[in-house]
Amino acid sequence: MSDLPNRNKFERKLTSSIAEYMGTINGELRSKKIRTSDAYWKTKSKDFASVIETPVRDIVTQSLKKHGADLKTKSGKALRDRLIADIVDDQTKSFHIFQLAQSRKIKDSLKGKKQTTDLIAMKADVIAGVAKSELLGRTIVTKANTMAAEGLADELNLKSPLDKWMTRPGYCSICSGVRKQPRKLWNKLGWRFENGPPAHPYCNCYIIYKNL
Ligand SMILES: [Zn+2]
């Protein structure tokens, strides 16, 4: 039974990459004084995918190694590559959907009002804020760790109904409901957190495997 790798190190790397990218978008929105469009966010989402690819690769690789995967084998490499692609794809979709929703909400709130550059720039801050990027980064870290561990457990057929959902100090009320609960409860199809942590943005939970 092994614990997860040092999250802080990976969190810092992924969150700083995302924060830096969000900063670029922020600067772009300010300097060009552009209004965000669906096409704009489509391009940004593509770039977002390439920004997170390498840090996600590192997290998945470390997490798989920590759980005993042999990444020298063909199947180990295939598993790693599949997980990286899944996580990057999944998170890029979330990023895109969120940004579109935000920019539409902003457009609606500006309707009928005099639009000053300052107001648009201020709203851009809300979209591209560091808080949001940190949230995204932390959620991806948790998701990447869970997907790496679950992917390996699947591959080796080592999942157990007794695997446990574990919280870290400072866990929230959402996770207190699943704290130390076995997989047979939270992994039930159709249950709210059937895929394991994260249960919410900033979720810092992980799974302890009985057989790993
Ligand atoms: Zn949690």
Image (spheres, helix red, strand yellow):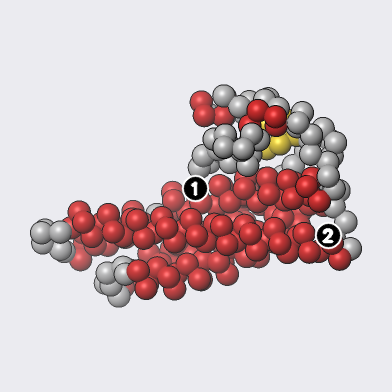
Which image quadrant is residue 176 in? top right
Relative horizontal placement of residue 165, taking residue 51 as reference (left or right): right
Is residue 17 depicted above or below 156 in this figure?
Answer: below
Which image quadrant is residue 105 in? bottom left
Assign the N terminus to one quadrant of the image. top right
Q: Position of residue 44 (x, y in %)?
A: 44, 69
Which image quadrant is residue 107 in? bottom left
From this viewpoint, is residue 128 visible? no
Relative horizontal placement of residue 73, taking residue 5 as reference (left or right): right
Instruction: Report the residue at 15% width, 59% height from top.
Output: 111
Q: Residues within 10 Å of mark 2 (few under 14, many from 20)?
A: some
Q: Residues within 10 Å of mark 1 (few under 14, many from 20)?
A: some
Instruction: Look at mark 1 in the image and give the residue it sits on.
Output: 135
Mark 1: amino acid = Leu
Assign the C terminus to one quadrant of the image. top right
Q: Which mark is residue 97?
A: none
Mark 2: amino acid = Gly
Relative horizontal placement of residue 159, taking residue 84 as reference (left or right): right
Q: Position of residue 147 (x, y in %)?
A: 68, 49
Q: Nearer the viewer, residue 55 or 44?
A: 44
Could you say whether the residue bearing mark 2 is in a helix, strand or loop? helix
Relative horizontal placement of residue 75, taking residue 51 as reference (left or right): right
Proximity of marks 2 and 1: CB atoms separated by less than 8 Å: no
Instruction: Report the residue at 21% width, 56% height from top.
Output: 108
| Separation (CA) of disc 2 from disc 1 | 30 Å
Could you say whether the residue bearing mark 1 is in a helix, strand or loop? helix
Instruction: Report the residue at 11% width, 58% height from top.
Output: 113
Q: Position of residue 203 (x, y in %)?
A: 56, 38
Is residue 169 depicted above or below 206 in this figure?
Answer: above
Any atom of ligand 1 within 8 Å of the CB at mark 1?
Answer: no
Instruction: Look at mark 2 in the image and give the residue it sits on.
Output: 76
